[in-house]
Amino acid sequence: MRAVCVSVIVVGVTYAELASGQSRVSFGTLDKTAIERLFDGYSVAFSNQDYVKLRDYVQAPFIRFGPSNTRAEAGLGDWAVLQTMDDTIGFFRTAQDALKAQGVERFEWGQTRISALSVDRALVNKSYRRFRNDGTLVMDAASFYVVSRSSGSWKICGILNQDPREFGKTY
């Protein structure tokens, strides 16, 4: 089953490239700005625990590859496909609870790299830092986010955490 899910994800992400004759896709300023606004809204909703508003920025199914850097695994293992919006929001609630338990009060975005995968999909590499209220650094982190455009708006549909020392590297 796991192999089938991974195959479906890989084919779904790459299909648009194959169907378009492998032409190179890139985003203009409008798409990049829209993606940046997506992350601004997402971070405000997540930080404020506004789970109703968070639904505007994420979509289901939501895929989490690898362990969460909040250490809120809840038995999900290496990766999880969260099939419903309720499951997706539940994951973010659990992550927020884990961050609170670690004393995290705020975070700051760092660098961003946006790579077009197709005209309606992107891979967004973002670095960020999490802090306690007294300013103590709790975590220096980075993640890849899979975003897609549906009905004219961008949404986050997956996350893969990475070692921050690897941020921005391509092979």
Image (spheres, rainbow, N blue to C red):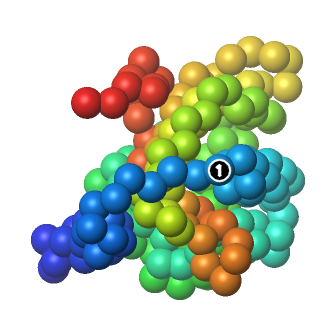
Q: Secondary structure at mark 1?
A: loop
The vertical placement of 96 against 148, above or below, is above
Q: Position of residue 134 (x, y in %)?
A: 85, 18
Which residue lies under the disc numbered 1? 28
Q: Quadrant of residue 30?
A: bottom right
Q: Position of residue 161 (x, y in %)?
A: 44, 41
Amino acid type of the residue tagged 1 in the rendering: Gly
The vertical placement of 164 against 20, above or below, is above
Q: Is residue 71 left or right of residue 109?
A: left
Q: Quadrant of residue 93?
A: bottom right
Q: How many marks?
A: 1
Q: Nearer the viewer, residue 95 or 115?
A: 115
Is residue 147 at all visible to an observer of this figure? Answer: yes
Q: Quadrant of the C terminus?
A: top left
The vertical placement of 133 against 101, above or below, is above
Q: Position of residue 19 (x, y in %)?
A: 29, 75
